[in-house]
Amino acid sequence: MSHSSTVDASVSGSTAPAADGVTGFINDWSADKQTYHVPWGKAMMWIFLVSDTFIFSCFLVGYMTVRISTADPWPLATEVFALSFFGSDPIPLILIAIMTFVLITSSGTMALAVNYGYRKDKKKTVILMCATAALGATFVGMQMYEWSKLIGYGVRPWGNPWGADQFGSVFYMITGFHGLHVTGGVIYLLVVARKVWLGHYEKKGYEIVEITGLYWHFVDLVWVFIFAFFYLL
Amino acid sequence: MATTASGQQQHPLGIYIKIWILLFVLSMFSYMVDYFDVQGVMRWTLVLVFMALKAGFILAIFMHVVWERMALALTILGPPMILLLLIFFMAVEGNYTEDARVQYFGHDADRSPLHVEH
């Protein structure tokens, strides 16, 4: 991928870095001045996301540990999350598949919102951000349905009708924490979309949309791992 | 395809649309693994490969990491690598615990889970 190395001095507060790649990496760290040539908000969002990565990783590694260490059989996710429509036979894992598609769709609309933000197309940016928030809310709604269904089956953090007791605690912990992130993201998106609409970023620039987008894509990224490890494996 | 003057990430729309479609297709493949009840080594391989590809494309394109300077990219990707060590240690520990439960507490590790009544 090509990469132009010019960074505006007004943003970086320093002269433009000349080199890319490894040389650029060494220069950035050893030049005795600002290391990251991005707006401070973006650097801070990335540092937050790296720390959040460790939180979700602790949950997933904890899940792996209890699942390996229990001698009880692990319940079959494919059956637990099956759903029947209009009296059909239950379709395996269908609810989770739909949730995954909803979240990916929202990631796509977010990516486009970032793009239109930098084009200073206020209207399209706001519409796409609101669409992203709506899809996020849909996801949380489906998750609430999923929770109520499992609670109805008698899945508790301390036991369930099918196998290892840890299934419930892992499920509520991981999907609950992820759902909390999605809910927070929906609120964050709506707040920023409103400010974009009011024209607060006309002068400051639209980096904030990209920063919001980073958070949103991260939530989608975490779901990719939850989908694979908790629901599919 | 370039990072503009103020460190902004501005790229053609086409690439986002293509990655978007690709993510749909990869998710579809992941779901098909479950739908067609692929089991064993094949299941693990397929699920992990599709997962890695999806995560990679989201990070690289949607989150623009491939276009960032190496200093930022390595700050993002470097520290989480230590997690591989944690995963390894906890897998060893987990297997030890399970063996102990089977050997000393008489747990039976070969039972199947009960089926779900819908």
Image (cartoon, rainbow, N blue to C red):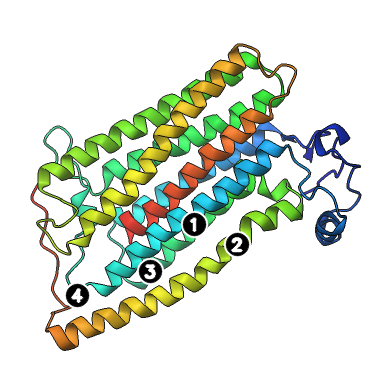
In the image, A21 versus B24, the foreground residue is A21
User: Which residue is identified by label 3?
Assistant: B42
Same-chain status of marks 1 and 3: no
Quarter occupied by residue B7 = top right
Marks 2/1 in contact by CB < 8 Å: the verdict is yes
The first of marks 2 and 3 along the sequence is 3
Measured Cα–Cα span from mark 1 to mark 4: 27 Å
Q: Inspect the image, locate mark 4, and give the three-letter code of the amino acid beneath it.
A: Ala
Q: Secondary structure at mark 1?
A: helix
In the image, A145 versus A17, the foreground residue is A17
Of all chains, the one bearing label 2 is B
Residue appearing at x 75%, y 34% in the figure? B8
Q: Inspect the image, locate mark 2, and give the three-letter code of the amino acid beneath it.
A: Pro
Task: Point out which mark residue A54 bears.
Answer: 1
Near mark 2 (Cα within 10 A), the count class, few <14, some 14-19 or many ≥20, is few
Same-chain status of marks 2 and 3: yes
User: Which residue is identified by label 4?
Assistant: A71
Residue A81 percent across, percent down from the top left: 22, 48
Quarter occupied by residue A101 = top left
